[in-house]
Structures are given as C-alpha cells and as structure tokens.
Image (spheres, rainbow, N blue to C red):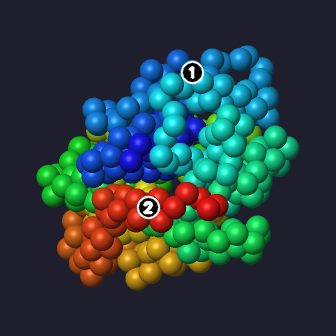
Amino acid sequence: MRIALLTYSTKPRGGVVHTLALAEAFARAGHDVTVWALARGGDTGFFRPVSADVDVRLVAVPEVDGEAVGERILRSISLLAAAFGASPALPYDVVHAQDCLTANAVGRARGYAGLWRTVHHVDAFTTPELAACHERAIALPGGLVCVSAAVAGEVRSGWGRAATVIANGVDAARFADAAASGAGEPWRARYGRYVLAVGGIEPRKGTLELVEAMAVLGRPEVPLLLAGGDTLFDYRGYRDEVFARAAALRVEPVVLGPVDDVELPGLVAGAAVFAFPSTKEGFGLAAMEALAAGVPLVTRDLPVLREVFGGAARFAEGPAGFAEQIARVLDGGGVGGDPERDPAHATVGRALAAAHTWDAAARAHLALYRRGAPGA
C-alpha cells in the first residue's frame, strides 16, 4: 500500500511519537509510507532520526509575531492543505491524519470521505477556531480510530460514531535496555531519588496538582523533575501559576524542558517514581515507557488509565492521594531503576509494556485498511 500519515508537529509529543513509530512499522511490513508534518520554528527534521524507508514531507510554518492561537491554527491548516493538495505523490491508497489540524487540512485539500483519523483523546477547547477544528475532525472523516476503548466510548456518546480501537505500541526494549544497562545512574548521581513527570507544564498534564502533592509529601530530598514541552498553545499563564504555587509551598521543581531523545530512556529508567497526574489522556504512552523500564507508576484514577494500566499502576486522586502513593513507593526500599524495590509491580509493568508493540499496531491498522475505504 501507499500510505500517508499526517501529524501536526515535529516535536516529541505523544501523537508525533505514535506517527513515526507506526510509519516505521508499516515500512518494515513492506509498505510505501510518507509522513507529512507541520514544521515550526525553522525545524528541518523531527526530534529523532526517522528510518530511511519512510519518506518525510515537512511543511514550513514560519513564525508570525503576535499571532493569536486561533490565527495560527487556521494558517497551519491552510499551509498544509495547499502543500498536500498540490503534491504529485497523490493518490495514496490510505490517508490517515493523527490530529484535528491535519484532518482539517486533508479535508480542505481532498475531502473528508476517504480519510482515516485517529482520535487520541477528546478535548474541550475554548479557542473558537480550534473548537471548530476539533469538531470537524471527529464528525467528518470517513473512518475513525481510537487508541483506547474509553476514548471510543466518548466518541460514540458525543458524536454517535463508531471507532475502531487499536492500542498504541511502545518501544519497550529501548526503555528496558536503558534500565538494564545502568543508563539511569548518571541521572540518579545528579538528582538522587527523584519523581519524574514527562509531558511539559500544562493544565492537561496536571502539573499544578503534582506540585501540591510534592508539598504534601514533604520530602525535599526527593526532587520533582519535569520533562517535556513544545506545544501549539501558550501556557505561560499556567506556568506562572505553577511556579508561584511551588514557591509558596517551598517546592523546587527541576524543569528540564524537552529532553534529547537519546537521553530520555536513561532519565525515565533512573526515576524512583513516574508520576502521571494527567486530567485527560487517550492511552498514556510516556507512562507505558516508564513501566517498560521497571519504574513504579502512580497515575490519576481515570477510566482510560484503568483500562490501559490495570494492575500495573497505583491510582490516586488529588494531591494527598498522589503523595500517599508516592510515599508508599519510596518507602519500599531500593533506588530508582532497581526492580527489587517492587518486584511484583515491575514484573507486571514490564510484561504489559512488552505486549504493546508497534508491529502489532501496524498489523491491526493494515487489516482495517484492507477491509475497505473509510465510509464505504
């Protein structure tokens, strides 16, 4: 098959990680794959190397000073629609958008009827242009995929549409190898036993609540490390709120920002606890990577996370609940990256992560594509 996958960014966000890994799995299976992406800030490539078997088409989105979020959304859609619609590489056998921006761009360029779209999670946007983009990208594409049954249920109840559930894969071996090789040791040498959160400082990731949990925990010798970032939205107001609250509570989070892809497995493997207080998720790929490294996972008690992680995670609600579960892990003995600190959970978590492969996800997608065009 000739397959086009489209994603809204070149940065290490969950949907982008998903797009690249799925594209490479398609290529391993012998298919002709092209990844289309919006490239901001002068980016000339993705956050990590991409297999030479995958064709990459980047559409530049030049920065515009003072541009509002809604204006940036509309301009991004227009730029990608123009580039995709004019591409001599068409027609593809399969066109699959991984987010609302790229779904809208394809719809504008070629129509929605033959489009597959993965709904990673359902959002409630307040920016009018983005809310409309989100609505069209669920209501109009010919076929929908969701990465969990919980999200598929939201799509069914909110839009009356059935979606095929295909779980994410995870590069489990990469994170397991980092733990086994001692790649977490330099991070532990620098920070000691630390609590790690990956995903940036933003409302959906529950950063403020995690800062409050660290204050309740009351262990200043155990730092909170915050990794990740690079989103479409301006969260400076929320970041200011988080930092002000941290200062008032005398919590001093270590803000790492985006971490190089080569360094990420070691950072994850070195953690004593992986905290995942997201208020909205579709699967939880970063948390699954932590389980692959044998790191205890404390996550918010959401239906989707119960579905995905089951007995491999500790579930919590509110700052006090997170503090309690983090303390239980810390008091279990051992140090980050040592499976003996919690052998039962480490074994269950590693097995769960290893069961989610990108090749299996690719096979499920290919079977879906072969059943016919979306909407047929």
Image position, residue 180 (x, y; %): 15, 58
**Foreground pick, 189 / 232:** 232
Alpha-carbon distance for marks 1 and 2? 33 Å
Mark with earlier residue (1, 2): 1
> Which residue is at 85% across, 44% downward?
128
Q: Residue furthest right?
A: 128
What secondary structure is found at the residue carrying circle 2?
helix
Residue type, numbered disc 2: Arg
In the rendered view, would you say 354 is above or below 21? below
Residue 68, above or below 368: above
> In this rendering, would 83 be left or right of 289?
right
Percent of width and height locating residue 240: 69, 40
Residue type at mark 1? Ala
Q: Which residue is mark 2?
A: 370
Q: Position of residue 283 (x, y in %)?
A: 51, 64
Determine which of the numbered discs, if any, sits on residue 60 in the image.
Answer: 1
Instruction: Tell me residue 228's x, y (percent).
Output: 49, 43
Do the residues bearing badges 1 and 2 touch, measured as CB atoms within 8 Å?
Answer: no
Rate crowding at label 2 as few (under 14), some (14 to 19) or many (20 or more) other CA atoms within 10 Å: few
